[in-house]
Amino acid sequence: MTVTDTRDREVLSQTLKNLPGDIRVETGVHSPVLLEDTDMVVVSPGVSLNQPFFDLARERGVEVIGEIELAFRVLRPYGIPWVAITGTNGKSTTTTLIDMMLTRGGFRVITGGNLGTAITEEVLRCLKDDTAGDVEYVVVEVSSFQLESIREFAPSLASILNITPDHLDRYKDMDGYIEAKTGIFRNQTSDDCLILNLDDPLVRELGPHAPSEVFYFSGQGNPLTSRGGVTPPIPRGAYLRDGWLCINADGKEDRIIRVEDVRIKGIHNIENALAASLNAFLCGVDLDVIRDVLSEFRGLEHRMELVEEIEGVGFYNDSKGTNIGSVIKSLEGFQDGVILILGGRDKGSDFTPLREYMRGRVKGLVVIGEAREKILGQLGGVADTLEAEDMADAVAKAYSMAGAGDVVLLSPGCASFDMFKDFEQRGEVFKESVSRLKKVLVV
């Protein structure tokens, strides 16, 4: 086995220490000579498939797949159903909720993918422990990048939470991004299930093209009736009715929990809760278990995380908000008094849709990172605006624009790589900056 990376060996030194000694390592280049003794190339999701090395591999008959596909093939002899979740936003929260519901419901589960732990790592652990045969569900969060490299991957239960513009620095246009997302159900059959967001027009329109049985979820507060060409005789899915999260998957409506009793707040999190509940219900989890998880789950770090309150000003860490759709969802959770910290490395986004959501909600804007000039050009005049050099400067300037009852919201709408290793580090630096500010201000 060979690992190849175009980065220098010095940069990868810590990572390389974790590799078994019998693995050959090539750095600085992808040498075509490697393909002479290779049957399969497994690509990291962050690496674009549009590279000459992969074109050459295909020309030579070498299969090119990703780690999701590899894990799926390795586990296929065990006949374990896969539960897969994708979408522009909310994937990690929904995946975590499903994992908790299944585990609390008594099922043996392995979970991984885009939310942190590679699913191949979990599969390898099970194989080493000889416990793969005991696994009842594989739950996996899959990104568009990961779906680009599937071939046979066919989850028994797939979900698309939403689709909004993202990663347009990687895809030619939105059609390319949507095409990648549809890979999650491309290999399904009539024995499988697909869950779609009825309120998202791009997602809703995918229903008639699915080979599987389709269910919907809706956070609009109405049962699923005729909408956009979808006319189920009975609401089939999960939705809000009279202040309750409800499920009707088989002709009988069941109430799960009142909206105010769901611990994670915001309409986007209610949508995540509905999608997770429907997934768990279709997997056989009791409603009491689903209810308990929804009433207890506090949410994930860096996703609308309340960090601190200083002199009546709340600081929220939404560092995972790396696209415009995510920023919009976060802003919808507030009525007014928001000081928004926006910016980072641009992913080909159009920031102008934020204007209508900022009006009346955002009283101040602090702009950071490489995308500053673009943001200033597209959002100029919509709110009082300041530029910041780093996160500590952004936090201080945001606080200077706020008053008691306001909130400072880090929801960058951009990638983090211009200033940070990843969105987690960006969120940690934000929290550290808030903590230092409090020590200075509060004696």
Image (tube, rainbow, N blue to C red):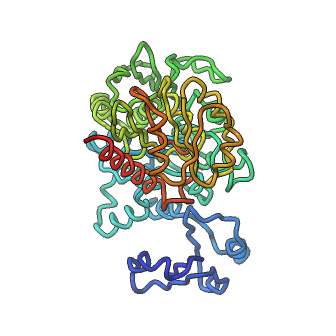
Q: Is residue 309 visible?
A: yes
**Depth check, front residue: 118 or 170:** 170
Give how far across and how far down residue 408 sits, in percent. Answer: 45, 37
32 vs 383: above or below: below
**Depth check, front residue: 385 or 234:** 385
Give how far across and how far down residue 284 sits, in percent. Answer: 35, 36
Give the number of callouts.
0
Question: Residue 169, located in which quarter of the rendered image?
Answer: bottom right
Question: Residue 103, located in which quarter of the rendered image?
Answer: top left
Residue at image point 56% right, 57% down: 146
Q: In the displayed structure, does residue 79 sit left or right of residue 236?
A: left
262 vs 89: above or below: above
Residue at image point 42% right, 12% down: 242
Quadrant of the image containing the C terminus:
top left
Give how far across and how far down residue 59 sits, in percent. Answer: 73, 74
Residue at image point 43% right, 54% down: 424
192 vs 290: above or below: below
Q: Is residue 188 visible?
A: no
Q: In the displayed structure, does residue 240 sit left or right of residue 6?
A: left
Give how far across and how far down residue 230 sits, in percent. Answer: 63, 24
Residue at image point 68% right, 50% down: 348
